[in-house]
Amino acid sequence: SLRVGDVVAAQQDRWFVLEMPVAVVVYLAGVLGFSFWGPLRTPAADLGGGVKAELSGVDRLVFLVGRYVALVVAAAFAVPLFLGGGAGPLLPAPLWVLLKTVAVLGLLVWARWRVPLVRADRFEEFAWAVLIPATLVQLFVVCAIVLATFDGAGTGM
């Protein structure tokens, strides 16, 4: 389903991070690449300073804050997609969402400091050779499981 509530409801028994680990890795790599942050940031060898060289003051601040906001939003969206939304023991759902978002954001920050800088052409080769085929294999496995457990009444698993 494309409804976030339905995706969270489908994770009552088991989170999708356990059932679809390749999708989580590809999603988080996409987040880092989309925000030009972490190991997929632009190389520091650019003597001209890149796009940020043209910016100063408030414009530069807005540009950099936009990258951080993209990271936070993507980390928050990973919670209903892969971590079961607000499900958890003892604490209320909004607090679980906040804790899980902080955990995913912590993982992204850790990747910035622990994973070396990757050139864009090398990452593109890796994506075409490894990530896309692995994602397709995972898609076929998940489809096979869904079809094998389909009850025929239209209610799914």
Image: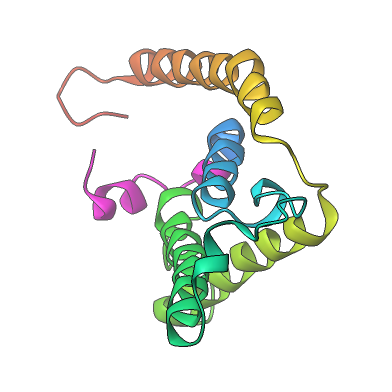
When asked about the image quadrant of residue 89, the answer is bottom right
Q: Which residues are magenta?
A: 1-17
Q: Quadrant of the N terminus?
A: top left
Residue 73, compared with residue 36, is above or below; it is below
Is 92 colored magenta in this rendering? no
Residue 7, compared with residue 141, is above or below; it is below
User: Residue 126, percent across and down?
Assistant: 68, 22
User: Residue 98, percent across and down?
Assistant: 50, 77
In this rendering, position of residue 2 left or right of residue 127: left
In this rendering, position of residue 89 left or right of residue 142: right
Q: Residue at x 56, y 36 (%)?
A: 26
Is 15 colored magenta in this rendering? yes
Q: Nearer the viewer, residue 9 or 47?
A: 47
Q: Residue at x 29, y 19 (%)?
A: 150
Q: Nearer the viewer, residue 1 or 24?
A: 24
In this rendering, position of residue 43 left or right of residue 143: right
Q: Nearer the viewer, residue 68 or 134?
A: 68
Residue 53, compared with residue 16, is above or below; it is below
User: Residue 61, percent across and down?
Assistant: 50, 81
Q: Quadrant of the C terminus?
A: top left
Residue occupying the far front of the picture: 48
User: Residue 68, percent across and down?
Assistant: 52, 71
Q: Residue at x 77, y 50 (%)?
A: 45
The number of callouts visible is 0
Q: Residue at x 52, y 55 (%)?
A: 35
Residue occupying the far bottom of the picture: 57
